[in-house]
Image: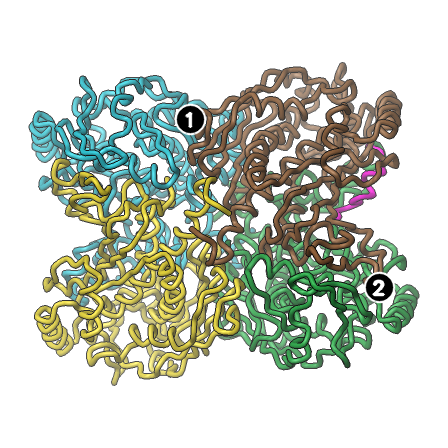
Chain colours: A green, B brown, C cyan, D yellow
Amino acid sequence: MASNSFGQLFRITTWGESHGPAIGVVIDGCPAGIAITEAEINVALAQRAPGRHALTSPRKEPDEARIYSGVWEGKTTGTPVSIIIMNQDVDSSPYEAMKSILRPGHASFTYLKKYGHYDHRGGGRASARETACRVAAGVLAKKIIATQGIQTCAYLHAIHDLCTQPHTTMDELIPALRASSIFCPEPLIEAQMLARLSATQATGDSLGGVVTFLATGLPAGLGDPIYEKIEANLAHAMLSIPASKGFEIGEGFGAAMMHGSEHNDGFRSDLTTRTNHAGGTLAGVTTGMPLYGQVAFKPTSSINQAQQTTDVIGNPRTWHLPPGSRHDPCVAIRAVPVVDAMCALVLADALLMHRTAQMEFSF
Amino acid sequence: MASNSFGQLFRITTWGESHGPAIGVVIDGCPAGIAITEAEINVALAQRAPGRHALTSPRKEPDEARIYSGVWEGKTTGTPVSIIIMNQDVDSSPYEAMKSILRPGHASFTYLKKYGHYDHRGGGRASARETACRVAAGVLAKKIIATQGIQTCAYLHAIHDLCTQPHTTMDELIPALRASSIFCPEPLIEAQMLARLSATQATGDSLGGVVTFLATGLPAGLGDPIYEKIEANLAHAMLSIPASKGFEIGEGFGAAMMHGSEHNDGFRSDLTTRTNHAGGTLAGVTTGMPLYGQVAFKPTSSINQAQQTTDVIGNPRTWHLPPGSRHDPCVAIRAVPVVDAMCALVLADALLMHRTAQMEFSF
Amino acid sequence: MASNSFGQLFRITTWGESHGPAIGVVIDGCPAGIAITEAEINVALAQRAPGRHALTSPRKEPDEARIYSGVWEGKTTGTPVSIIIMNQDVDSSPYEAMKSILRPGHASFTYLKKYGHYDHRGGGRASARETACRVAAGVLAKKIIATQGIQTCAYLHAIHDLCTQPHTTMDELIPALRASSIFCPEPLIEAQMLARLSATQATGDSLGGVVTFLATGLPAGLGDPIYEKIEANLAHAMLSIPASKGFEIGEGFGAAMMHGSEHNDGFRSDLTTRTNHAGGTLAGVTTGMPLYGQVAFKPTSSINQAQQTTDVIGNPRTWHLPPGSRHDPCVAIRAVPVVDAMCALVLADALLMHRTAQMEFSF
Amino acid sequence: MASNSFGQLFRITTWGESHGPAIGVVIDGCPAGIAITEAEINVALAQRAPGRHALTSPRKEPDEARIYSGVWEGKTTGTPVSIIIMNQDVDSSPYEAMKSILRPGHASFTYLKKYGHYDHRGGGRASARETACRVAAGVLAKKIIATQGIQTCAYLHAIHDLCTQPHTTMDELIPALRASSIFCPEPLIEAQMLARLSATQATGDSLGGVVTFLATGLPAGLGDPIYEKIEANLAHAMLSIPASKGFEIGEGFGAAMMHGSEHNDGFRSDLTTRTNHAGGTLAGVTTGMPLYGQVAFKPTSSINQAQQTTDVIGNPRTWHLPPGSRHDPCVAIRAVPVVDAMCALVLADALLMHRTAQMEFSF
């Protein structure tokens, strides 16, 4: 099935391979009248770009998005917004020599089984480069929800066993994140993380991490029972990000270690809750409290160490990065803006959907 | 939007409230020729029924499913299968006195905000009773995937801090689960869990838990990049279950604590992998290794203790269970067959979808 | 794929066979707060019921709909509305003797090829009985659009070469249709039609017909470019009705015989158009002028004459109606309320969708 | 909702405005392994290009499609195929002076009402230029169905009252169409049509027309009851083409003038039917007989005559083509390849879907 789309009313469709001429996204269902510029998209793309700090992989081109349709005189028109990002750094020759080897942790084996062939050039469609399209679309999603006062952000909560405190105050988070090259809001932890990253990179190995997402300013009522619960759509969104392995809303797995008397969030006279263990959702619908949760990322599969594996017909082979390659010691860092974008996409969709829930709403 | 459906090619639509006359499910897209009986569905329903062991809530009626369409002479016909389960125990009067109180951890507040009213009778549509429909549909899904040699199961991995070992061998699990009233495969842990449940119930409190799902016999190739990854659809499925708060595939959040050199699963000459940290999926597509993961459940929100909250206009109120009620001290137990059913539904859909991936497949 | 659903935001899913225990419809996406009763649905069902006049087929039971969910204290709750209609007159024995014969014009051959078997009992799922579910759902759709001042109706425009004038004034049409047993608004034509029907029925033969649909009170702006044009969705809806063979919007095929200077509808100072050749839609979006068009129906396939055909393995056979059967000489008559319901379903969906088109709309 | 996509399993999403930098289509769900080149797409685009014969509008650039993703080493990979066509002839200045005038028969009024603004540049998104994307996608669809021996074509059946005979033999049609600049298979009728077109163009007026579609080599069994009937999807597809006003399958409206004894197609010993009044479908599923039908097109709305209309606030205005413009006297001609493409798209989708209907099919 058409599996390269996400969202119902605010729907993105992405296309493109890491080593093809370009990647792109078509955003369908964007309401008319949203002001948007290419410059704004490029600022967002720079956030997730490789090479942002010394430790991520060094694809050096600045991503430049061009809007090909759906925007006229600076505003969306209601027609599909097509955004294209050219690929500039696409030497796939280093991969030629290893094209029949099954890279551990990569799509090579499963795509081969699914499609009967495999595009070995740097990950092809399965490359994280696809996520640039999500970040571009996320810019529009964030503008839509901002019209209702909703803000989202994401930060690097943990690398391996180094982790931050929980943060739910947007006003403090935003400037803190701006000051960090790895989206970590706590300078002391950030310093430890950077040291750990350097040390691990020196060994050629990689590290897993955890990203926290947060949304504030939400009205109560977003999300649709039973199968379009806000947390179900968020979980779907987050597990569609390459390398993600887990999702939590609110206390998440921690809730499994709590008692009901502790976890239940009682209401106050202003109809907010005293605590927010639930993470801003009850029965799949937002409560108006901050929506937050976490996404786990596995350690980068591409490591600079020899790995024992086989070729496509089972002959033992050793896989190693092409000579001269550098690798990204922790994919969770570059995943931060993607997690944020996916959260915004889910909320934009839910917001448009919510307008159909009650007949008394004015048309 | 139509939010009461799940799946694309094998699609279920559920309807009904806990205190209405009946609940039901329409299964659309079921291939013709699958043998199915009402008795088989009733066996599955008995698994998740309340009252199965002494500690779950005591709604005593045996659920009886009736097939109203789509099956003829014992086999599916290709037309929609409509299954209806009558509600027999629907006294909603105990809830009348408390109907304007916002129950902590329940849908009352959010449904009110979403729809402008709230059906207070025992949870209404948000009640876990809806999950009986998923279990009924799961029986058909399990039969579809069984035609290709795929089996699924789920078990209770943890209640609070009491947890089992990981299990990935279906042959041992199935009989062990049959012997347990709480779906726990390890008798020693089961005994501890039962003791903890009794003790907690005596205090009126509740406990969270974790359920593990497992599927074996899978071909490589199921799941569709980018947004219909098998783990994305599983996450969506699991977070749509009432009270679920987290999802993991493979090592899950544990992967965030690993190094790449440790997490990567190298291939062997038979194209299986030496380890299976990934949990049977790479880049969203099954590898053929066992698919496994976990789902976290919060402690039951209905506790037998007074809770401070408000009514719908913010007046302070105390919520307590209606006199004479009993409560379910751990919803994770009854969620086990639901987790299993959702896993089967995701796989049935992916299996049908997979037939369209390569043109060389025979029609 | 799940092919038994229609609509996106206001979505119906129908189930059931003509000779099974019941048929039903689940309506998902209905906004909360719509007043609805079973009695209102039954009035609508009586319109399409067989046996309404002397000439349609004589299945005599009064259809009685029961609402099983989604309505509480007389109003929709926002949860799925499940409506079930029991089948009371289901003797399938007359069809036993002919079960291997391919009935000309029926689903027997194509369903056999699609599903590998065929439910021969009176048409099974392909029976027009399924359309009762559409009429039931149409009652809710009509109520939704009525909140915005939109009304729909349909009438019998033609049987064979006997046809009415075009009608676009709802105030005259509604009482005229109430007075006619065959939904024909012109008494003189109705009399000729009834005479023709009697004469044809006497020969055992059947007649084709044409139904006109009409909607008034529409705002400009409903319908979504490019592939959800209002006329595209109407065409889809109408061609999903059993026995339908053609669809026109506005002048339809007549437009192919016009010049541009004649067909173009110029605007007036009140932004209505002088003429309405377009039928109330431009580029797929409503203009606010009356929406109208036609649907062609083939003559009833079941005729009371011997027909030369074969059995499922190609042996020559003669097909005739079971002894004692009566047949419906013109299916277009009973299709009238179905056409009306489908029009209302399309408009309800488009109305809900329209709320997402502009950001300036208040939430 | 995302309304710029068509199809379920084989799904196209189009984007772009006539006066923007480019238009494009993303084809999702295309099976891996289909050989395709840009040259093949360009040949198809040349068929619908303006300027193909003296009488269509003179946008002179040759459309050149570029494949940006989803094809590697000459074959589809299973990932989305992104095709982009640059716009080269986009002087929108002639429209500036008239930008506030409501063009009769155009999208200006309805898009304004829907989106709160209007892109006046030559039709914007509502321009028929969007159909080039459908033709490009149709090339892939035709290749998919050709793997199963299915062929489609379309021809110009009528301009105003000049019409051809019915044609259902692909072998004669294909070369006849290749020889005609207006897709008319009968040279004598073609000559009359060309003369009529010239005469009408001289007056500045335009003409309606009818296009016939035809598909042969079909297996029995394509199409899905109830709401995805093959004729319902075809009707949806055809009414989504700009300027289309009607759809018929088989005898279409002619069936309304027939008796059942005449219309019913009896089976022969080879399980084909003696006649094919049904047009190759019974109960929404293909019979294996040729699938055929017709699509009506209104006369071109842009005529070279002054037309009385208003501006957006109701002031009387006269609309005329910008000086020096030429106009297309009959849009039905250029619609022929679009009708053919839409037929192929519907069949490709139905073909992929059909693989899920029976469990006995091998995986």
Q: Chain of mark 1?
A: B
Residue depicted at x 55% and y 26%: B23
Residue D221: in magenta span? no
Circle 2 sits on which residue? A185
Start and end of the magenta stretch? A247-260
Image x and y of residue C262, in percent: 16, 64
- In this view, C325 is above or below C344: above
The answer to whether the residues at label 2 and label 1 have Cβ atoms under 8 Å apart is no
Q: Nearer the viewer, mark 2 or mark 1?
A: 1
Question: Which numbered dot is residue B72?
Answer: 1
- The residue type indicated by label 1 comes to Trp
Q: How many marks?
A: 2
- In this view, D50 is above or below C13: below
Between B319 and D345, the one nearer to me in the picture: D345
- The residue type indicated by label 2 comes to Pro
Q: Quadrant of residue A308?
A: bottom right
Image x and y of residue B346, in percent: 60, 43
Image x and y of residue B63, in percent: 60, 20
B275 on left or right of C145: right
Q: Chain of mark 2?
A: A
